[in-house]
Image (spheres, rainbow, N blue to C red):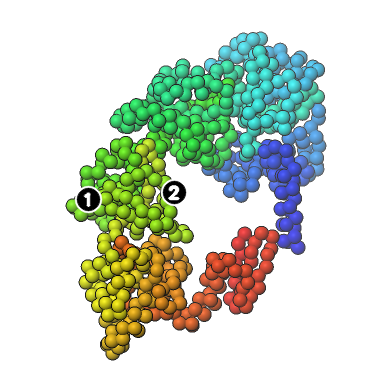
Amino acid sequence: MQHLTLFTLAITLIATICLAKSPYQSVLQHSRIRGRQHGPNVCAMQKIQGTDKKYFTNCKQWYHRKICGKPTVISYECCPGYEKLSGEKGCPAALPLVNIYNTLGMVGAATTKMYSERAQLREEIEGPGSFTFFAPSNQAWAALPTEILDALVSNVNIELLNALHYHMVNRRLTSEDLKHGSAFPSMYQDFNVHIHHYPNGIVTVNCARLVKTDQHATNGIVHVVDRVITAVTNNVHTFIDTDDDLETLRTAVAAAGLTQMLESDGHYTVFAPTNEAFEKIPPEMLKRILGDPVALRDLLNYHILKNMQCAESITSGTPLETLQGTVLEVGCDGSDMTLNGKAIIQKKDQLGTNGVVHYINELLIPDSAKTLLELAQGSVVTTATKLFVDAGLGSHLSGSEALTILTPQNEAFKEGVKMTGELKKLLKNHILKEQLSSGVLYHRQELETLGGIKLRVLVYRNSLCIENSCIAAHDKTGRFGSMFTVDKVLTPPMGTIMDVLKADDRFSLLVGAIQTAGLTELMNQAGPHTVFAPTNDAFSALPKADLNKLMGNPQELASVLKYHMAKEILVSGGVGSHTRLKPLQGDKLELNMRNQTVYINKVPVVEADLMATNGVVHAVGAIIKPLSPKVDREQADDPIRTASSMITDSRIGVKNGTYSWISHSLVWCIPQNKLLLNWC
């Protein structure tokens, strides 16, 4: 019964919200549902602690109990248009329908009502007509700078009346009529008021948030807003062109040829870096970017969003696309608007006819405007970057060559690593001769390095590797080059597998065994091969009689060795939690990774990724034997492993169990272990 009640509630919630006509209505409906246990027409509101800011609640905010990263308190209030009755639950009564003047007093806009009377607007908003009044709340008037308020009230018949008329539209506009990007002529010289209706349900007029909407009156409708709005006459470029604090930006915009765009029709958001922001950039870097039209245009477009975002529209971190093509994380922290998690916005909501300008005190430099050296700064590859410079490769990283650099993470290097001739040579082979994206790489592709060798691309189900180094982070694409962050220092291939084995004293017994078994030619062939190479210690661990018998039987020896070889190349980075490999002889090899160590049939690899031109060698400390049927049964009886295998193999049946579909969840019931695995 409890499950049925929850199911009914969920269906009701979904159906009600789906029937809502706008984002605002969806949020209002959600607030109604959350508040209905307190009576009819009750809405749940979330108030940010320590402030007077309240919001209707959506699902995300309801469960997180946070807005702009700050905790909220839930309160239950009458939904718009309703009021309480003494002795009755909820808000059963509709507000009395009166004219706009009297409505102002009932909806928290008493100060607007007072100023309407002083400006001799009362007769107009009491009389016949059909008006929309965006009425500043009492708190909005209190927050108005003193000099502005004094200027208004000192000339009530002109300045104050004009200001109030700018808050009015000569037609009735409900929240449904307030479409995103729309504009309506106000009653002050037909200057437009600009509406934005955001997906999170926030509605703004000239970037002022509507805090109480759809308060109906006999002669129109009232929407209470959280600030006093002013007429907008200039486009966003005018702010840049006339403000001395934006002088450097003004020069950059002209040099990049963006003036016409910022004067054209649109709904832009411009994060305008101040002169101070430009001064924080190293002079050489700033000079390079300002002198490079492509980099400069990318830099400026990275500061411009494709859509208009007022500060009040942001209630949590949101990725928003820029004109440059990448995204900025626009968020908030309490009352501060943030960019990429940093509170760098000095001045918000400078509204123009074609967008909004927010002043920032820190320049945002996209990767596409950076050199390879600049891409690496302040990241997890600082050790590699310093070594590249110490190796005399800095000019390649700061120049205009089309290159791709493989930069190992800091933890890939031993502590206190010193520059040597061998390391210089190795680092040169970490730089590829062309600019690449990981998205265009394919299996067995060969890439040429500055050192003149060829590196192989290896593609696995969950990893993309270049030789033994696997890509550990998203690409960074700079002005001329790209950077791949990799998990290991590259080991370039040196000779065939047989050459690798002969060069390492640990494998002297294995080399002899390969020769005895007649497999030398195979280990020198093109491959690719993966060899799990038993060390001398592994052979010595066998009973002496068994070892002598094995070495004396070339056919049996070849069978044992072929069980340690596979006809494909598998580096350690390609091994997952349950990887299978087909050996040259025998059924299968079971591989997994535990605590950064690769295991083959439960035998640990003592050193991985000895790269050869025709494959890879992994040193093992024991002779690998096939898993016994008992081990296979144990694995099969492991419910988590069994379920995992079934998902991997796309099988539907469950041995000794049942399966069923419930809604969109696949449920396995495994009676032996009483375990339920439910993917929602």
Give the Cα distance between marks 2 and 1: 28 Å
Q: Position of residue 242 (x, y in %)?
A: 46, 16
Nearest to the observer: residue 542 or residue 514: 514
The residue that label 1 is drawn on is 424
| Left or right relative to 490: residue 250 | right
Q: Where is residue 451 drawn, in percent x and y?
A: 26, 50
Rendered view: 621 above or below 393 = below
Q: Residues within 10 Å of mark 1 (few under 14, many from 20)?
A: some
Q: Which residue is mark 2?
A: 440
| Amino acid at dot 1 | Lys
Q: Position of residue 332 (x, y in %)?
A: 52, 38
Name the image quarter holding the C terminus. bottom right
Give SS at disc 2. Answer: helix
Q: Residue at x 27, y 69 (%)?
A: 498
Looking at the image, how many numbered discs can be counted on the residues?
2
For residue 181, which quarter of the picture?
Answer: top right
Residue name at image x 35 percent, y 84 percent: 556
Secondary structure type for disc 1: helix
